[in-house]
Structures are given as structure tokens and as C-alpha cells.
Image (spheres, rainbow, N blue to C red):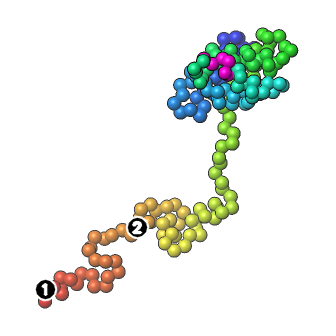
């Protein structure tokens, strides 16, 4: 069984992970209402009579008057308030321990993220062996792109237009 200090360390780690989730400039010391709601959903706090409205009300109660975020201490107070709602009929100290157990060691999940499509038309369009014409010249036999050498005709610097048949004859004509 964990000691109380180890349990509080795990709780604080979870708080910090959710506090920085989705916010690039976050320090991990303060959590927004959106991230608090995400934590409550993913840790199954919003069950057995505890609703998202309850979560929002508790967040509003625990944050400061003009603040939009909660600190770790306010987070602990919020969990204590939610424990009575989530585990109604259980003594307060057991409910607090139970809600801490739900939260400890959890990390934010990346649900509903966009995944790359690799079926159907995408496979056909990215198969370089089926390319024709000038596009075929952009890739080598293995299907790897040639870079600039495959996209542009490299100049030889001779000063003549490409495919000019009288190349190198100017000096001969002008001296006559």
C-alpha cells in the first residue's frame, strides 16, 4: 500500500500532466477549467450522480474570484468537494481516498485525433511506379524522389536555347 506522501506525489504528477495538456506555454502550476473537466471525464469521476455540471460548479467554487485557473491546492479542495458527490453515502475520509485513487497515475488521453489515411485513392496516388510523362522523371527506380534534379532541366551554360541545332556556329558566321 502507498504511503500518503507517495499518493500525494502521484496526485501532483497527474495534476501537472493535465495542467500542461494542450497549452504550449503552460508551466504545470495552474489548471484550466477545460483540462479539469477532461481529467474528471477520463478518471471516471463523472459517474454515479456526479455530472459535468457538478464539475463546473466545483471548479468555479474553488478558483479565485478573478482567476480562470486553479492551483494544486485548489485542485485538492475541488477533489474533496467532488468526492462527496461521486461517493455519496461513504464516510468523507474514505471518499477522498477513493477519488484520489481514481486520479493518481493517470495521463491525458489523445482521443479523437486525426489519423493519416492509407487506403483507397491515397495508395494509388502515392505509388510512384504508376507515374507517367514528366512526373515519372522526378523519381528513381526505387520510388525515391530526385529533388531539384528531377524537377528542373539543368542548364549547361552554353548560351544557346535548348535543342538548337546550330550550336557553336555563331563565331564562324560573324567572321565572314
In this figure, which residue is indicated by the disc labeled 1? Answer: 175
Q: Nearer the viewer, residue 96 or 142?
A: 96
- Residue 27 image point, x, y percent: 53, 25
Highlighted magenta segment, given as a residue range = 59-64
Q: Nearer the viewer, residue 100 or 130?
A: 100
The image quarter in which residue 162 lies? bottom left
Quadrant of the frame with the N terminus: top right
Residue 146 vs residue 93, the one in the foreground = 93
Spot occupied by residue 19 in the image (x, y as percentages of width and height): 60, 26
Exactly how many numbered labels are in the figure? 2
Q: Which residue is mark 2?
A: 152
Q: On the image, which quarter does residue 107 sit in?
A: top right
Q: Nearer the viewer, residue 141 or 163?
A: 163
At mark 2, the secondary structure is loop
Tell me the number on the disc at residue 141: none
129 with respect to 54 (left or right): left
Q: Is residue 106 visible?
A: no
Where disc 1 sits, the SS reads: loop
Question: What residue is at 69 percent from the left and 28 percent from the top?
Answer: 37
Q: Name the residue located 64 percent from the left edge and 23 percent from the top edge.
A: 15
Please indicate, yes or no, whether residue 132 appears anywhere in the rendered image. yes
| Quadrant of the frame with the C terminus | bottom left
Q: Taking 110 as reference, is 106 above or below it?
A: above
C-alpha gap between disc 2 and disc 1: 36 Å
Residue at image coords 26%, 74%: 159
Q: Position of residue 56 (x, y in %)?
A: 70, 25
Q: Would you call the spot at circle 1 few (<14 residues within 10 Å), some (14-19), or many (20 or more)?
A: few
165 versus 43 height, above or below: below
Q: Residue furthest front?
A: 65
- Quick check: is 50 in the magenta stretch? no
Amino acid at each position: 500500500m502507498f504511503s500518503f506522501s507517495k499518493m500525494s506525489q502521484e496526485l501532483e504528477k497527474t495534476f501537472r500532466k493535465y495542467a500542461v495538456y494542450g497549452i504550449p506555454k503552460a508551466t504545470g502550476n495552474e489548471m484550466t477549467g477545460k483540462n479539469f473537466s477532461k481529467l474528471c471525464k477520463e478518471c471516471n469521476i463523472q459517474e454515479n450522480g456526479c455530472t459535468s455540471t457538478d464539475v463546473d460548479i466545483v471548479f468555479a467554487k474553488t478558483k479565485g474570484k478573478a482567476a480562470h485557473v486553479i492551483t494544486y491546492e485548489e485542485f485538492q479542495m475541488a477533489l474533496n468537494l467532488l468526492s462527496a458527490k461521486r461517493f455519496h453515502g461513504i464516510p468523507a475520509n474514505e471518499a477522498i481516498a477513493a477519488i484520489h485513487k481514481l486520479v493518481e497515475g493517470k495521463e491525458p488521453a489523445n482521443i479523437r485525433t486525426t489519423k493519416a489515411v492509407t487506403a483507397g485513392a491515397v495508395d494509388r496516388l502515392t505509388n510512384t511506379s504508376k507515374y507517367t510523362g514528366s512526373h515519372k522523371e522526378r523519381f528513381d527506380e526505387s520510388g525515391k524522389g530526385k529533388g531539384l534534379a528531377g524537377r528542373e532541366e539543368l542548364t549547361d551554360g552554353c548560351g544557346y536555347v535548348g535543342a538548337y541545332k546550330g550550336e557553336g556556329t555563331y563565331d564562324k558566321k560573324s567572321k565572314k
